[in-house]
Image (cartoon, grey):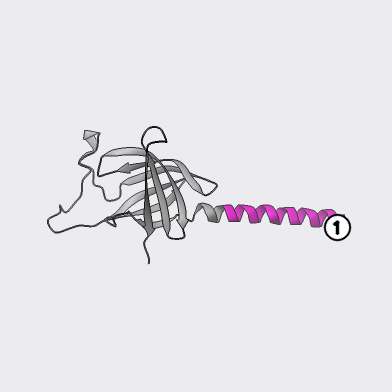
Amino acid sequence: MKTCQLASIVVLLIICGHQTVQGQSKSKIIGIWYNTEKTARIEIMENENEMIGKLVWIRQNEGDPEVFLDVVNADTSLRNRPLMGLTILKGLKYNNGIWSEGEIYDPESGLSYTCELQLKKKDVLEVKGFLGDSWVSRTVEWNRVKK
């Protein structure tokens, strides 16, 4: 009887420990990231069962408009919306170290792409965007914003 109880406790601890490790891995990309050019910061957060990313800072140069608008969006009805706070990453689901099945919006081109993210180092995030079939892609690296 005691052996059975001990085995049950060990199995329960292994299961709980495995779920904790998976939860920690899934959340490693949560935080604020610079885009490749360091002209914007994107905050990645969990929203229900997916990861999303919002524009939280855009570098302004002298002469830039006070509010950046989504002026090149393919959908003309969205061209007056502000870029600040805009969700540019959505639908990302975690699977074995890769956040995939998502979509990324590029405010410079006004187009959306299928995407996946992978943490290359603690503070380096690989962002891969796919146009149509997965054989046409572009990969960039984002760097975590240091506090």
Please tell me which residue is depicted at 49% across the width and 47% down the height of the picture.
98
Q: Is residue 26 above or below residue 109?
A: below
Q: Quadrant of the C terminus?
A: bottom left
Please tell me which residue is depicted at 74% across the width and 53% down the height of the picture.
11
| Residue furthest right as drawn | 1
Instruction: Give the percent coordinates (x, y) of residue 39.
Output: 26, 56
Please tell me which residue is depicted at 25% across the width and 44% down the height of the picture.
108
> Disc 1 marks which amino acid?
Lys
Q: Quadrant of the N terminus?
A: bottom right
Q: Is residue 19 above or below residue 131?
A: below
Q: Is residue 36 above or below residue 135?
A: below
> Which of the pair 15/33 is nearer the observer?
33
Is residue 146 shown left or right of residue 79? right
Give the class, few, some or many, for how many residues have Cα within 10 Å of label 1's Cα (few <14, many ≥20).
Answer: few
Q: Is residue 15 magenta?
A: yes
Dominant SS type (magenta): helix
Instruction: Give the percent coordinates (x, y) of residue 60.
Output: 20, 57
| Residue furthest bottom as drawn | 147
Q: Which residues are magenta?
A: 1-22
> Which of the pair 72/51 is nearer the observer?
72
Identify the residue position indicated by label 1 in the image. Answer: 2
| Residue furthest front as drawn | 135
Instruction: Give the percent coordinates (x, y) of residue 104.
Output: 36, 42
Please tell me which residue is depicted at 35% across the width and 38% down the height of the picture.
113
